[in-house]
Image (tube, helix red, strand yellow):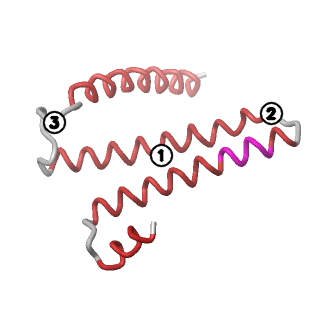
Amino acid sequence: MKEIESLIESGAVEPRILQEFREAVNHVRQTSWAVQKWIELRDQRQDPYTALEILVVERIRCATQLNRELANDIESHDIGFETKGIADLSIAIESLTRLLDRLAGKRDSTKKS
């Protein structure tokens, strides 16, 4: 960590890599907070599964951020269809989009009621 800190302070790290590092640290921080909450709730004989919402919210935040970054990478031509894993990513996003559309449909039907 000290070596990373000195690289950061010297400006020897590409800003995008530094941002990725900060994002990873933030994810670890959020996840460790969820673990702490789980333990506290369990020790207080409350439902620890409510702490899972923290993890879900964190995954959504991370996925949103990653999608924005991937879109930027595609627009700047850093990613192309030949990029390893891009076809699998496309399939996963199509599947997620269908599920999100289904959720949105449920949301819209409850608004009409």
Residue 43 located left or right of residue 61: right
Estimate the x, y position of residue 113 in percent, counting from the top left: 61, 22
> Crowding at label 1, few (<14), some or many (≥20) Cα neighbours within 10 Å?
few
> Crowding at label 2, few (<14), some or many (≥20) Cα neighbours within 10 Å?
few
Which mark, residue 61? Answer: 1
> Crowding at label 3, few (<14), some or many (≥20) Cα neighbours within 10 Å?
few
Identify the residue position indicated by label 3 in the image: 83
Estimate the x, y position of residue 87 in percent, counting from the top left: 21, 26
Estimate the x, y position of residue 53 in percent, counting from the top left: 63, 38
Residues at marks 3 and 2, CA–CA distance in whole angstroms: 44 Å
User: 66 or 82: nearer the eye?
Assistant: 82
Residues at marks 1 and 3, CA–CA distance in whole angstroms: 24 Å
* Residue at position x 43%, y 26% in the image: 100
**N-terminal-most mark, 3 or 2:** 2
User: 74 or 106: nearer the eye?
Assistant: 74
Residue 35 located left or right of residue 82: right
Identify the residue position indicated by label 2 in the image: 47
Region of the chain picked out in magenta, as a range? 34-40
Q: Is residue 111 above or below residue 45?
A: above
Given the image, on which type of amino acid does mark 2 rest? Asp
**N-terminal-most mark, 1 or 3:** 1
* Residue at position x 45%, y 20% in the image: 102
Residue 84 located left or right of residue 3: left
Given the image, on which type of amino acid does mark 1 rest? Arg
- Does residue 50 show up magenta in the picture? no
* Residue at position x 12%, y 38% in the image: 80
